[in-house]
Image: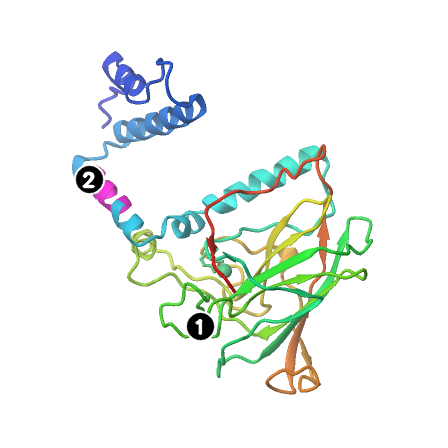
Amino acid sequence: MSLDIFNNKEVQDLLKAATNLEGGDGNPRFKQIVNRLLSDLFKAIDDLDITPDEVWAGVNYINQLGRDGEAALLAAGLGLEKYLDIRMDEEDKRAGLEGGTPRTIEGPLYVAGAPVREGVSRIDVNPDADAGPLVIRGIVSDTTGAPLANALVECWHANSKGFYSHFDPTGAQTEFNLRGAVRTGPDGKYEFRTLMPVGYGCPPQGATQQLLDALGRHGNRPAHVHFFVSADEHRKLTTQFNIEGDPLIWDDFAYATREALIPPVVDKTGGEKLGLKADAYKEIEFNFVLTGLLQGKDNQLVNRLRASAQA
Ligand code: MBD
Ligand code: FE
């Protein structure tokens, strides 16, 4: 039973005071957003009779989430990052921007600074006995199909344990293992020689998994490979593909799977000639189509805190 006090003058005055809504100082946009979010929280407490115990459990949870460094992981798991994609998709639709490779979420595990190679990069640096060789290759083009020279394709993915270098709790990987960047030539081609990834799982003792447990959800992703693709006069694409056949493909805790992002995995031989660790290998051909700028601007560039390292 709600006490229905949200609209009382005392509460509304408190919200205005707490966010300095009527004062001249502070950042107007920031004040507007904090006022709205705080108001929605106050209203939810009133509507749902959220108890003091529940409020303090939530406050303490935020502290734990920060201690674990998992706020961006939780944002992916709660669909917040997917929601931003849904909004950008709708913006594109309304602007008539069509024909590009679909975007999907970046996730929290990119590391800036991978060495840039011309055309081809071998990115498996550390041995991984449980992972077979994988070649990922394709062409970067514009929406007319013309290859884009000088495009930069960045790639990052997990090892056979589902761990990413730089964030690997086992210490098994050096900086930039399974992370790379390739500059396309006039043919628009890129190629990564690497190892087959396995799906990621949230740290079992972390705050994200704790919340997912309470929701009755798992914290796993199907095997996938992330990409940033950029080229002059085009919008930077953030996307991933999934490894076909993974049982979690349509049960991703971060909601990143899209129909057009599940390329076929093809069995090949001749890996020894390519310098791969075995002659039999898997190949995934995946082409990227970049869309043009919108009124001269890349409206899908996202600024967020990202890790970086020196190769
Ligand atoms: C990942 O590898 C990832 O891609 C996302 C979105 C969240 C956690 C781990
Ligand atoms: Fe990932």
Nearest the viewer among 245 and 295 is 295
Eye-nearest disc, 1 or 2: 1
Report the front residue among 214 and 231: 231
Quadrant into which the N terminus falls: top left
Identify which residue is drawn at 17% across, 39% down. 53
Queried whether the magenta region covers residue 93, the answer comes back as no
**Label 1 – label 2 distance at C-alpha:** 39 Å
185 over 304 or under it: above or below: below
Q: Residue furthest left?
A: 53
Residue 146, image x, y percentages? 82, 53
Residue receiving disc 1? 173
Q: Tag 1: residue type?
A: Gln
Q: Position of residue 174 (x, y in %)?
A: 45, 71
Q: Position of residue 192 (x, y in %)?
A: 64, 69
User: Which residue is identified by label 2?
Assistant: 56
For the point 77% across and 50% down, the residue is 142
Secondary element type, mark 1: loop
Amino acid at pointer 2: Trp
Specify the principal SS of the magenta part: helix
State the SS at label 2. Answer: helix
